[in-house]
Image (cartoon, rainbow, N blue to C red):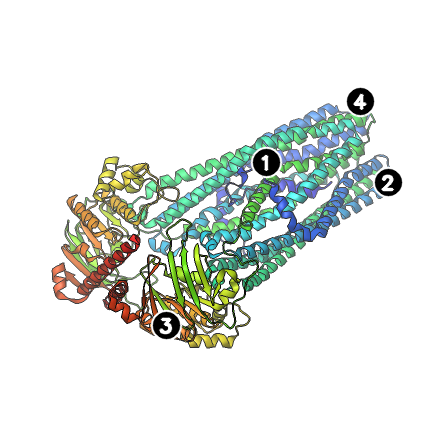
Amino acid sequence: MPRPTDRPGWRTLLSHARRHWRTYAVGVAALALVDAIDGIAVPWLTGAAFANLEREPDLRVSTALIGAAFAFAALLQLGMRYAWRHFFIRTADRVGSEMRTALFLRLQALPLSYHDRARSGDLVSRMTNDMNDVRTAAGSGFLLAADAALYLLFVIPQLLWISPRLSAVALLFVPLVLVLVRKGGQAVHARSAAVQERIAALSARLQESFAGARVVKAFAIEPGEELRFQALARAYQGAQVHLARFQAGYAPSLGMVFDLAHVLVLGLGAREVLNGRLTLAELVVYTRAFDKVVWPMMAIGMVTGMLQRGAAAQARIDEVLTEPVDPAAPGGAAPAVDDGPRLAGGLSVRDLTFRYSGADPARPPALDGVSFEAPPGALVGVVGPVGAGKSTLLSLIARLQEPPPGAVLLDGHDVRDLPPPALRRAVAVVPQEAFLFSATIAENVAFGRQADLDQAAIEEACRAAHVDGEVRALDGGYAALLGERGVNLSGGQRQRLTIARALARGPALLLLDDALSAVDAETEAGIARAVRERSGPTRVVVTHRLSAVRGADLIVVLDRGRVVARGTHEALMAEGGLYARLARAERLEEEAARLERALGDEAARG
Amino acid sequence: MAEATGGKARGGERQAGAVQPDDDADLRPVDLQVAWRLLPFARPHLRLVVLGLGLMLVVTAFGLLGPRLLGATVDAIAARDADGVLRWTLLLGASFVGLFLGRWAQGFALGVLGQRILYDLRVTLYEHLERQALSFFQRWPVGRLVTRVTGDVEALAELFSVGMITILSDVVTIVAVAGVLLWIDLELALLGLSALPPLLCLVLVMRRPVRGANRAVRRRVAEIAAFSHERLQGVRVVRACGAEAEDQARFAAVDGAAVAAYDRRTHLDALNNPGVYAITAFAVALVLWRGGEAALAGRISAGTLLEVIAYLNWLYMPIRDLASKYTLLQQAAASSERIFELLDHAPEVADPAAPAALPTPARGEVELRGVRFAYAPGGAPALDGVSLRVAPGETVAVVGATGAGKSTLGSLVLRLWDPQAGQVLLDGVDVRAVRQADVRRRVALVLQDVFLFAGTIEENISLGDPAVDRAAVERAARAVAADDVIARLGGYDAVLGERAATLSQGERQLIAFARALVREPAVLILDEATASIDPATEARLQAGVRALVRGRTAIVIAHRLATIQSADRIVVLHAGRVAEEGPHADLLARGGLYARLVELQRLGHERDDVAATA
């Protein structure tokens, strides 16, 4: 059998106890006091009241004193109970916070390819649900374990000391209960799993039935659906009753075993009293102390489940924490020298070939021998059909994906050798999807540069992106909150805000990934002008709208990862080929859109 | 002494609070009105209810017997009465066995009762939901409906087990124990009962802050989840903007707020539960003092003193977890409110009280008379006075720009919606006058976006109709040329799970064609796929459409020129009205709306062709 610490998760889970051993130790001390009062003081004080009855009047202890001692013990317990909660539970919450933060930092630093694969819902669940299981294990779990151990430590020697003869019989039932608790726990677990399975089947069926409501209605198959649902609901009910049948007997039978053990102790103890081997008061102490053996037995059952769940959750968290980080993330493997060189924005792409990790090696690479040069301030257009590798190219230039060495150079430096902060400062990306965070507009525009962008710079960027007027018109203006509970922006507005976000950073190299698809051509031209007039960054523009790159210094036509043509607009049109065909498709599309608009306008007029 | 239950109370004290999905349930007072509405669901199981209540009394009685027998045993020991000791311990053991049997039977009876009621409730709710009109399903997110039928119904179980039985048994226990104590000794009883007012005070005083703290924890945890989720979705932006350090500070703020909320809850818990224990311990101290005196004075026996202390344990137990019971009740009440909200929702499209019959045999005539329909009452009409008669066997192609009201027209014939004005007639009978199921057996609908269930392909075509056998399914699939696609998917018994996602829109439509054809409807409504489709599938689709419309009335919301040209008649919908009507050539020659629509389509196709070769 493998040692528990060898199983995944356990080692980390226990390391929390080691790291916070001081606070846990204080908690255990407080707990020990509480348990000592419960397990020793209370039985003996109760016994003292009965001892009086067997003593000569002048040897009696004042019952008022006994009561007062009892009350004092209660007061002490009140304080100590507060203390152990403070030290155990709060420490567990610290552990939770540490793990959450570690997880967040790791997720931030993982390569984007990891995020493309992983489901964000699953990762969030590790940060919340799994974290909660770890918290419970590090709090209630550790606590219960300590509690059970302390009780047994205090009570068992007492029992043996008062009456070894009685204890020889009474303690026989301890292993019996342990087995019962363990077997019972397993049975409950198995039956609960069946319940979970059936409810999952029921939910899946419901999901289908509601999502497919149109089909269900249109074909009037409600009766059949109801029969299916009834069968699943019946199966679920069956599993629940199966579980209830066991649980109905389980807890009471545990109770009965305890109760009968108690009766046994009382009966045998009575014989000892009658034989003069014990006093009545000692028997009272014995029974009161024996009561306290019950709880640790139950606690052991609970604690194993809690720790197992905690370890399993910890293992899932560890899985993420041990993923290798992206060297391009700050704090990654790249040399963390000063700020790095000041960059002017000259870009060279040299024989860039790239294959996604895990891609089928039999298939052609995503990019195959792509080369082009963009001197500082140049405008490069990248066009091509869907799947040509345009977005991949931008990701590699921005080092969001890791390019091969020597393939992407900024002012002659390989982007892999630049310190990430310097790279991020020099390069701004406007992604295809206009992603904004649930924060104010100003925060979104200054995202990542909160410290060095003032309001004037934010507004200036928004003016250049032709969105300033609309932002001012919003309730709250630049302080308006975006997101679920905030204002809703149109797709075009969102896109222009992401442009503003890029412009606000004053980049030397600006990468636009089809970033203005929801903006009309006229506004797009205005934005392009504003971008050029600013500090004149080098621009690499991926676009489906050829008109946007008509005046480019260089247009690169990509198809299936290769450069199939390059040149200016005029040269490419004269050449015919893919570029000319794309241009024709675009004209057709514009015409169709115009016609559709005209029809729509007529429809609106009625 | 019932130590098992004592242990349970301690266990409860130490359980960490689970995160509840329902945020504001604990803000509202418990509205026990809803409990009355549940009573009809309990009525069919009246015998189990009575049995459960009877067993509760048995359990309470056996429970109360324990301390008395314990006292008698101790008295027998004190009196050195060996026979008495034997007698009383045997009786004590027997009472524990009785208690066990009573609890077991009670737990079983209540478990079965709860599950039966939940089954009835769940099926009633589901059947009610199935009767709702389509508009209902468009308003309600699927996930929320699923939660109501599963989670909320589950939470209701608490209203039965906690609400009805536990609270009742708690009240009975408190009253009975108080009575027994008063009967044993007035002074000791009053001392013991003196703990109740401060206990109740503590529970009441702490209730609000504790619930506030619990709510704060849930909110903060939800905030962490929301923040992390957004950061994961926007991870590319964070990386590109180099905003990691900034976000770490933001995360620390969100996380810090959560830790502070946890701390506040721990603080309150640490005052609350130990407070309850301290109060009861003080009362026991008083009893020990005065009881010890009384025993010394010979007013009570040693056994009675022990008995009183044992009874006190029974007295305080129900009050210790009063607050958590109240919270459970609130959640159950909130759940039942949500369930009844659904049950009270009358279907917008309902069968008439005295449904008429459609004439047989079916002719397949469809007529719209001055139909006006808007999706939102008072909103812009999707159809604005449409009159159209489709003769039996005729194929009508409906064309128009996006948003002209084409798809709406088909849905109205099936009576997925009711028009606000005008009439829809099927074989001369208003569809509102007949059963919905009768209409839908006669009219089949093929949608643009085909919904495929997770079952097998055969199930997806037969839709579980017992009248449709395998041979009919295969025949239909062959007729619409869907058999190739089905063979590629692994045959009729292949389960369409994840793989359904790999099917193109055209391929999905082929399966939907078979689904419609197998029912041999008199009228077919077909919403053609708009997406560009590869030439092979396109050819199959055209063959499928021909097989479908042959020998039946068909209204085709057409997007493909081939389909439009082969129709008997073309209806051009524009802004919810019939703008033009006639055969293809006539309409084209007129050079009006239809001609422009055809041009638009041609441009679109050409663009696709160019893009495909590009």
Query: What crowding class fits label 3: few (fewer than 14 Cα within 10 Å), some (14-19), or many (20 or more)?
Result: many
Looking at the rendered image, the quarter that the N terminus of chain A falls into is bottom right
Q: Earlier in the sequence, mark 2 or mark 3?
A: 2
Whether residues under marks 1 and 2 lie with C-beta atoms below 8 angstroms apart, the answer is no
**Chain for disc number 2:** B
Find the distance from the CA under tag 1 to the CA under tag 2.
Answer: 41 Å
Marks 1 and 4 close (CB-CB < 8 Å)? no
User: Closer to the camera: disc 1 or disc 4?
Assistant: 1
Give the Cα separation between the discs numbered 2 and 3. 94 Å
Q: Is residue B356 above or below residue B261?
A: below
Tell which subunit mark 3 falls on: B
**Three-letter amino acid code of the residue under disc 3:** Leu
- Above or below — where is B381 with respect to B312? below
Checking the image for residue A31, the label placed there is 1
Residue A576, placed above or below residue A313: below
Mark in the foreground, 1 or 3: 3
Q: For mark 4, what is the residue?
A: A58
Which residue is located at x 27 percent, y 38 percent? A472
Q: Dot 4 surroundings within 10 Å: few (below 14), some, or many (20 or more)?
A: few
- The residue at which mark 2 appears reads as B84
Snapshot quadrant of residue A62 = top right
**Cα separation between marks 1 and 3:** 76 Å
Q: Secondary structure at mark 4?
A: helix
Tell me the tag on residue B541. Answer: 3
Percent coordinates x, y for residue B113 in the rendering:
67, 52
Q: Chain of mark 1?
A: A
Could you say which quadrant of the image residue B489 lies in? bottom left
Which chain does the numbered disc 4 sit on? A
Q: Are marks 1 and 3 on the same chain?
A: no
Residue at (50, 38) in percent of width and height: B215
Labels 4 and 3 within one chain? no
- Residue B548 screen position, x and y as percent: 41, 73
